[in-house]
């Protein structure tokens, strides 16, 4: 999705809340620890670490569903600003459609808080996925590429859903009370150390924490086994081949053997992978084999992830070689994904004609009817058509210096958005097309209508701010930006925007009233946040 305003970054640096800054994730070490080791820091160490969100009443035996949800939202707000957060609508749309099917297969998975699970991708070459409080589940780009089938991907996501559904994180957080086992500050320090020296990171993490990890072990291993069991049940209920869990565990075992060999078995936070594989194999023997055809969208999303994982010249060249090799492989999915991937590579190189040509070839391959009389299993399309529509618009919208191309993009985006009304990426592209095409008032009307239904989308507020700016409506521009910052957790930045709106020469009496009311709300929210932090330090 587009980052609409160039000055947003400077505003974030100058006025963004320290709570969000303190929670920025540094991969690969920290992300790998989130689902099993995210623990509140002891009160005695609070003065030595950055401000962190309040985790709830320490006397509880687990974190309340409301506090769990709040904690997840706060962490996610920080994570969205990470440079490696893959802010790609087709990938996000696919993961959430795929993940929601798995969640719905597990009665009660949403819990008492009726969690809205959210699945997202991280640009990272380490094979990993992780669950956070509140139903936020992250997938590394390398894992998307390593998964050879949707059943393998389902095995990983089902396992992470199992962690959330069984409230493992909430139970860990609550169980530590004031005697936290692994301070979050130490984890952040280890993660930062990993940037320069993995050995130093292990030293920081292990130093003084051996007893804490030992005390954590039994619960961690039991939780992992339970997540495997629940994940296995979810896969079966959702119609996926459960043997995919074993296949992927074996691949993960091979990729992590180097790290596993560094630690003794009694000091590992997860059960040995071989033990988990043996347990799942025993369960599979009791199941009937269930062949399944992967959706076309799975292959297209993997192609996108391959390109977006490394957009350097070398990365694009390596991806191109993979895609050209796919053209030579049997199977419509392989050929179409190779063509789609080559369109992505050409687009990144600003070779728009080539990108359009490869995309047309991919569409033709996907839509090609089977040979008459030949047996052919239909290939599920899932989010395929919306992903193709998004790619077509990506190519056009990149050519913003050509008015005739942008005019065509407006018509195409309007049609695509009507065909796929639930695709948020296409909504944002339609907004972008209207603004680039100079149709500012039409863009404003469309965005206001969208905000009636989706008030919590910062992208809509961003585009509305840009439309106002193009019309010279400075006060409304800053008010819209303020709403975007609020949704992203930047209360100070939002207050700065409201201050600018108040000083705008075109601010009406009504605008001033809106600004006054919103400022009072945000100041109260800010005082509440500062009060929570003061309590933490006391």
Image (cartoon, grey):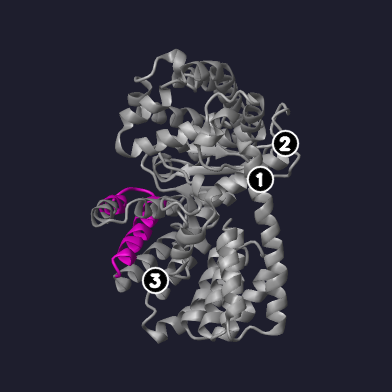
Crowding near the residue tagged with mark 1, few <14, some 14–19, many ≥20 C-alpha atoms within 10 Å: some
- Magenta span: helix, strand or loop, mainly? helix
- The numbered mark, 2 or 1, whose residue comes first in the sequence reads 2
Q: Are marks 2 and 1 in contact (CB under 8 Å)?
A: no
| Residue count near mark 3 (Cα–Cα under 10 Å), binned few <14, some 14–19, many ≥20 | many
Q: Is 326 included in the stretch rendered in magenta?
A: yes
x, y percent for residue 388: 46, 64
The x and y percentages for residue 150 are: 49, 42
On the picture, is 237 further left or further right than 121? right
Q: Position of residue 346 (x, y in %)?
A: 30, 65
User: Relative to residue 494, is residue 33 drawn left or right?
Assistant: left
Residue located beneath label 2 in the image = 64
Q: Which residues are magenta?
A: 321-350
Callout 3: helix, strand or loop?
helix
Rendered-image quadrant of the C terminus: top right
Which comes before the other along the chain, label 2 or label 3?
2
Q: Secondary structure at mark 2?
A: loop
């Amino acid at each position: 999705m587009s980052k609409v305003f160039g000055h947003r970054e400077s505003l974030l640096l100058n006025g963004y809340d320290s709570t969000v800054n303190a929670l920025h994730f540094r991969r690969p070490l920290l992300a790998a620890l989130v689902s099993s080791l995210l623990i509140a820091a002891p009160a005695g160490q609070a003065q030595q670490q950055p401000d962190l969100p309040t985790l709830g009443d320490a006397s509880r035996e687990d974190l309340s569903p409301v506090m769990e949800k709040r904690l997840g939202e706060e962490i996610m707000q920080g994570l969205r600003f990470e440079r490696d957060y893959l802010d790609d609508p087709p990938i996000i749309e696919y993961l959430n459609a795929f993940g929601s099917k798995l969640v719905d297969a597990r009665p009660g998975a949403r819990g008492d808080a009726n969690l809205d699970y959210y699945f997202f991708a991280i640009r990272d070459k380490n094979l990993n996925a992780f669950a956070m409080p509140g139903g936020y589940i992250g997938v590394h780009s390398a894992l998307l590429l390593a998964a050879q089938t949707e059943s393998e991907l389902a095995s990983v996501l089902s396992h992470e859903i199992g962690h959330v559904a069984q409230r493992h994180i909430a139970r860990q957080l609550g169980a530590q009370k004031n005697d936290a086992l692994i301070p979050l500050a130490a984890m952040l320090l280890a993660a930062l150390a990993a940037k320069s020296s993995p050995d130093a990171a292990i030293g920081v993490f292990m130093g003084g924490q051996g007893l804490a990890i030992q005390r954590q072990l039994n619960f961690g291993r039991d939780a992992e086994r339970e997540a495997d069991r629940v994940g296995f049940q979810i896969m079966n209920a959702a119609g996926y081949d459960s043997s995919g869990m074993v296949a992927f565990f074996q691949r993960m075992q091979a990729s992590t053997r180097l790290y596993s060999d560094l630690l003794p078995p009694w000091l590992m936070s997860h059960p040995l992978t071989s033990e988990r594989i043996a347990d799942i194999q025993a369960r599979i023997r009791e199941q009937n084999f269930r062949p399944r055809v992967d959706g076309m969208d799975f292959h297209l999303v993997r192609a996108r992830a391959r390109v977006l994982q490394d957009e350097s010249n070398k990365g694009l060249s390596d991806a191109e070689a993979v895609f050209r090799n796919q053209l030579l492989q049997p199977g419509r999915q392989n050929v179409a994904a190779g063509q789609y991937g080559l369109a992505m590579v050409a687009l990144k190189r600003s070779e728009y004609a080539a990108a359009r040509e490869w995309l047309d070839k991919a569409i033709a391959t996907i839509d090609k009817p089977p040979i008459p009389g030949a047996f052919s299993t239909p290939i599920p399309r899932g989010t395929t058509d919306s992903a193709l529509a998004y790619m077509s618009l990506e190519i056009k919208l990149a050519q913003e210096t050509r008015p005739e191309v942008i005019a065509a993009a407006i018509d195409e985006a309007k049609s695509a958005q009507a065909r796929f009304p639930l695709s948020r990426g296409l909504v944002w592209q339609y907004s972008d097309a209207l603004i680039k095409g100079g149709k500012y008032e039409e863009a404003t009307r469309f965005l206001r209508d969208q905000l009636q239904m989706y008030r919590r989308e910062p992208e809509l507020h961003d585009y509305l701010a840009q439309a106002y700016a193009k019309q010279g409506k400075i006060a409304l521009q800053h008010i819209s930006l303020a709403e975007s910052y609020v949704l992203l957790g930047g209360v100070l930045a939002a207050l700065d925007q409201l201050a600018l709106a108040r000083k705008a020469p075109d601010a009406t009496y009504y605008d001033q009233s809106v600004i006054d009311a919103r400022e009072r709300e945000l100041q109260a929210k800010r005082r509440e946040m500062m009060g929570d932090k003061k309590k933490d330090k006391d």
